[in-house]
Image (cartoon, grey):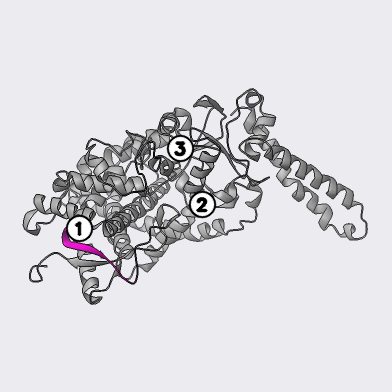
Amino acid sequence: MDSSSGAAGRSSLVYLLPLIAKPWLDSSSAAASPSWIPLALALLCVFAASAILFWCFPGGPAWGRSLIFSKKMKNAAAIPGPRGFPVLGSLLDMGALAHRRLAALARSHSAERLMAVSVGSTRMVVSSLPDVARQILASPCFADRPLKQSAQELLFGRAMGFAPYGDYWRRLRRIASGCLFSPRRIAAQEPLRQAETAAMVADISGSAARSNGGGIAVRGFVQRASLNSVMRSVFGRRIGDGEEEVQAMVREGFELLGAFNWSDHLPFLRQWDPQGVVKRCQQLVPRVNAFVRKIIQERRAEMAAAEEENSSSSKAAGGGEDFVHVLLSLQGEDKLEESDMIAVLWEMIFRGTDTTAILTEWALAELVLNPDVQRKLQSEIDSVCPAGQPVRDSDTERMPYLQAVINETLRLHPPGPLLSWARLATHDVEISGYHVPAGTSAMVNMWAITHDPSIWPNPEAFDPERFVENKSFDVRGIDLRLAPFGAGRRVCPGRALGLATVKLWIARLVQEFSWMPCEDSPVDLSEVLKLSCEMVNPLKARPVSRRPAATH
């Protein structure tokens, strides 16, 4: 850290001035004597003057403190950006449509390449251009992530998403790429995905029949299928009808991780926990620990019994084992402590559940609004899988239009429009000609990039043809014009599994049904940013079976 981090610490005392004065204000002698009034007024004047002084600089108060107290920053060119409000900076812009608001701010300040933003006391830079995004995501100086209070409380500081870059993080990454998300393992788990997809299709068919031609709410079906798929991959079990407790834990975790917590950016609020984030986390963590630890102990006992019988029939080397079994089988330097296993396994649930469900819902919504695209996709599926033969993973590789539909959905509705979580500068670094000090958070506004008319002609239109013309386009972090899973060291390790699942789901759902609009509930593409960017109003549509009644 350079002197700017120490300066930020010293200047943060300004925020504590009202608290320093509190003993004088609360003391019993204060009521008898007005001697505290001049001191309180002086402290308030210092606080107000400092807040206004810091606010005057480009980027707002957090950047103002750095520019005043850091010797390196005094000689550096100021990064353009909004000042926001004193103390708060642009904190109020980080709401349900933060990606759109940040894109508008970048345009208004001519700061698409790099924009300085203050979110309370958090110093941030935001890029809305692919070449600068690559500098950020590929830089070893941005290999860390700032640890949100909710993530820390929910144990994720020891999981891959938030663990600091170093030996432990590299070990987790090696386990993920070599054991959990390897191509061989993804292929071996196709029967699991097929089973959950078939169950989802059957549930939708039954619900559609009961609705007598009315619409169904799609979100519940894809969320259930997503959670069951991840639960079977991670824990080797589905969510049963009597396990509402597990579903409740997952929902609560989603809400806590997706909530914008003011205490992350105004540290003096942490002692009060005004949004109740810490309290809710402390109530959730013991339940999570008990649930995951029980499964680990059960699996450990099963493995011990199998070893005693010298039997390997239950777990073949082909990759059929769940993630718990994989982690328990690790030896040597890769072996994890049980507490770390709990953090890793629980993170898998959150990172793997919502993205696939949300992306599938967005895709179906666009297909309802664009029936010509839906018919063309059905024609491709029918040509590859004639006579209603169920689609398999190998079939989807021969469906370029399916891939184009998914790519266009990712472009128009990226689930993580700000790439989910920011990066953290561990050292001073130069980005796009600007000095960025250590301790700065960096975000890539992928939504702004994917809606930039200079990059994507007619960006607001849903047009899969743009990817048909460019069949080699890779969304896995190679081309930063569309990198919904990130890039560099912190790229999403489960992206291949997620894409395989979504391709299979959309292919099967479009193969089995024609998706029609509901007259009483038109498709609304309004969005809200939570843990991911989802539809404000869940999709309601009419699934009409494409199979003859006798064979459905």
Position in image of residue 310 (x %, y %)? 17, 48
Q: Nearer the viewer, mark 3 or mark 2?
A: 3
Q: In this rendered view, identify the residue nearer to me: 178 or 510.
A: 510
Foreground residue, 311 or 78?
78
Mark toward the start of the polypeptide (3 vs 2): 3
Q: Residue at x 40, y 59 (%)?
A: 250
Q: Residue shown at 69%/37% (left/top)?
A: 56
Could you say whether the residue bearing mark 1 is in a helix, strand or loop?
helix
Question: Residue under circle 1?
Answer: 510
Q: Amino acid at mark 2?
A: Ser
Dividing the picture into quadrants, the one containing residue 64 is top right
> Residue 262 appears at what percent x and percent y?
59, 51
Q: Are marks 3 and 2 in contact (CB under 8 Å)?
A: no
State which region is magenta: 510-521
Residue annotated with mark 2? 150
Q: Earlier in the sequence, mark 2 or mark 1?
A: 2
Residue 333 part of the magenta-drawn span: no
Q: Quadrant of the C terminus?
A: bottom left
The residue located at (43%, 42%) in the rendering is 448
Residue pointed to by mark 3: 128
